[in-house]
Image: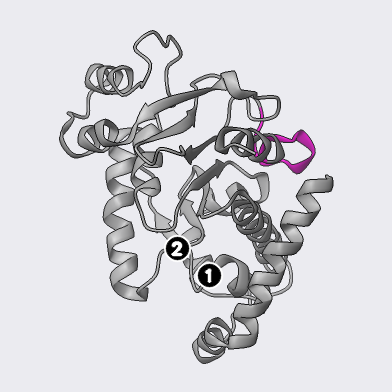
Amino acid sequence: MTVLQQLVELSRWLGAESRELAILGEGNTSALAEDGASFYVKASGTRLMDIDANGFVQVDLRKTLHALEHAEETDEATRIALESSRVDPAEKKMPSVETFLHAYLLSLPGVRFVGHTHPVAVNALLCSQKAEELIAGRLFPDEIVVCGIAPLWVPYTDPGLPLARELRQRMQGYVRQYGVLPKVILMQNHGLIAPAETPQKVIAATAMYVKTAKILLGTMAAGGPNFLEPRHVERIYTRPDEAYRQQIIAQMQAAHESTD
């Protein structure tokens, strides 16, 4: 299966209406192309739920990263950068305004697919007054196994270049603190991003964090969350058997998706 075919399947899974992860034109996805020098990203205005190969635009990774570094944060500069990033000069579709964000994430080691959604349960949390406080702790072992030691928190920022730059800065701080890349990125009043090596890992991180958000919101009706102690979080995160179980979960997810 080609990268683009995998991306189409991932996007449709994330966009399925019953999962409440994205509706209408919400969310966007991307994947590093086979050449490693370009990537596919959802075209502006398309829907994840019924997208096909024509719903994506192939863009130049180097050009997009250059724009992330140097382009002015104006609507006109953004439009020019997006148009000039397209690999095919004859392409008429406009890449998502979040293309810069996707380019940055796909330039990181081990990241080949990115899924950005607006899950109802997660946004119920991210749009609350105490969102940052509530995501500060871990609740249960599988959250840590699948979603990592902690999510990356990004305060609300205007989509496009400003958001991509804010995320990049926050990512650098996260790596300094934890020594690894986050498996889940949470953007205040916006949504969730799962960057990963495979589509299955994008799906697993997204699904597990939706479950985490539902549980966290549920605890608010029963006295508030009882977070695991940091020593327990660290122990779960570093246990060899949990690392093995994470591999098995990913394999099971891949097998399930092949029959879904």
Find out whether residue 201 is within the magenta segment: no
Residue 74 x, y percent position in the rendering: 22, 23
Q: Is residue 124 left or right of residue 77?
A: right
Residue drawn 65% across and 86% down?
Answer: 241
**Quarter of the image that includes the C terminus:** top right
Residue drawn 56% across and 89% down?
Answer: 232
Instruction: Please indicate, yes or no, whether residue 158 appears anywhere in the rendered image.
Output: no
Assign a secondary structure to mark 2: loop
Per the image, the residue denoted by label 1 is 148
Relative to 245, say whether 83 is above or below: above
Per the image, the residue denoted by label 2 is 182
Q: Amino acid at mark 2?
A: Pro
Q: Camera-side residue: 157 or 172?
A: 172
Q: Are marks 2 and 1 in contact (CB under 8 Å)?
A: yes
Around disc 1, counting alpha carbons within 10 Å, would you say few (fewer than 14), some (14 to 19), or many (20 or more)? some
Q: Amino acid at mark 1?
A: Gly
Residue range corresponding to the magenta coloring: 14-23
Assign a secondary structure to mark 1: loop
**Nearest to N terminus: mark 2 or mark 1:** 1
Around disc 2, counting alpha carbons within 10 Å, would you say few (fewer than 14), some (14 to 19), or many (20 or more)? many
